[in-house]
Amino acid sequence: MQRIGLIGIGNIGSHFTRLLCDASYPVVALDIDRAKVETAVALGAVAAASPAEVAEKTDIVLLCLPGSQAVEAVMEGAVGLLDHLRAGHLIVDTGTTHPKTDIHYEKRCAEKGAGLVDAPITWRAKGLIVMVGGSAENYAKAKPVLSLLSYKLRHIGPIGNGQLLKLANQLVLAGQIAVYAEAIAWAQEVGVDPRLLRDYLEFDIDDTFFGDDFSGGGALALHYKDLGYVLDMAHHACAQIPVTNAVHEAFKAVKSAGDPGWQQTGIVTYWRRLNQEQHL
């Protein structure tokens, strides 16, 4: 059985650890937060002290990291993954990373006889959807593990294409969140109970939109980061995305004036502040 490395034991990494350990895969775990590593060990994983150690003890390494900067930090340096890869190794980037990052490191891995696929994920009610970019050979190597972790899995195309589809997913979700927030704030201003949007009209609106507690793992900052990747790709492709530009500005304002540790529904405070200002 393949030995699996997990770098990044947050919500996704701990979920993966549980599934892999339950399936009797040998798992080696690493995170900068020692408490998270201890959680993984309690689930059945073995702790590692560095990316180099993860590489030395595994065959496939899953990166569950928050973006390009974190991927670069793990891949580079004397104790990074790159200098400790061997022929046949496979890196699977399950985070939302700029496509150019995965394209770059796929080439660097190939120089050592190793492979890399981008395999970002998105949650749905039934579980995880995984979208994979990379060669057919590397996808075939990753498929048994990724099939265990997901309820839908597809090879999207060459390296980077999984990330491109994930960014389209983030564009849609961000716009949806912004429209819900605007509708809730508008209903409040004109005197209609905004909860009727959910409770009577049956829109799938999270309860946190209606309150003041948006704590929940920093998803707002991560979504803001993802929209930055979308805008960068649009700039290089000369693609026009005026709606997403406006949504990105709302995320930016809340990230700056609110709390980057909030979940995405915290952007409802952007409209709340606008409406408060007009009443002054």
Image (cartoon, rainbow, N blue to C red):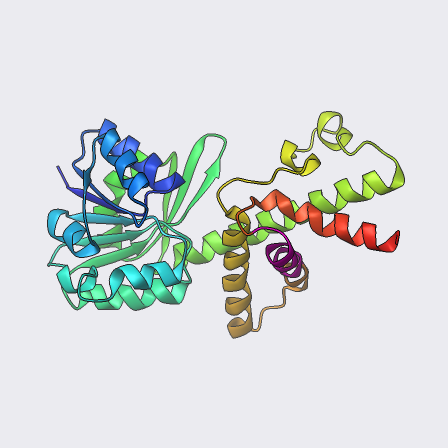
Q: Is residue 255 magenta?
A: yes
Residue 59: image location, x then y, percent = 15, 48
In the foreground, 144 or 82: 82
Answer with the quarter of the image where residue 160 lies: bottom left
Residues rendered magenta in the picture: 247-259
Instruction: Please say whether residue 206 is visible from this viewpoint.
Output: no
Residue under the image location 76 percent in, 51 percent down: 273
Instruction: Please say whether residue 207 is visible from this viewpoint.
Output: yes
Q: Is residue 91 above or below residue 149?
A: below
In the foreground, 177 or 142: 177
260 on left or right of 3: right
10 on left or right of 207: left
Residue 88: image location, x then y, percent = 13, 55
In the foreground, 265 or 151: 265
Residue under the image location 29 percent in, 31 percent down: 18
Q: Quadrant of the C terminus?
A: bottom right
Q: Please tell me whether the stretch drawn in magenta is mainly helix, strand or loop.
A: helix
Answer with the quarter of the image where residue 209 lies: top right
In the foreground, 65 or 168: 65
Q: Disc count in the image?
A: 0
Residue under the image location 33 percent in, 66 percent down: 103
Answer with the quarter of the image where residue 245 lies: bottom right
Residue 169: image location, x then y, percent = 52, 50
Q: Quadrant of the N terminus?
A: top left
Residue under the image location 76 percent in, 47 percent down: 272
79 on left or right of 130: left
Residue 150: image location, x then y, percent = 36, 36
Q: Is residue 160 magenta?
A: no
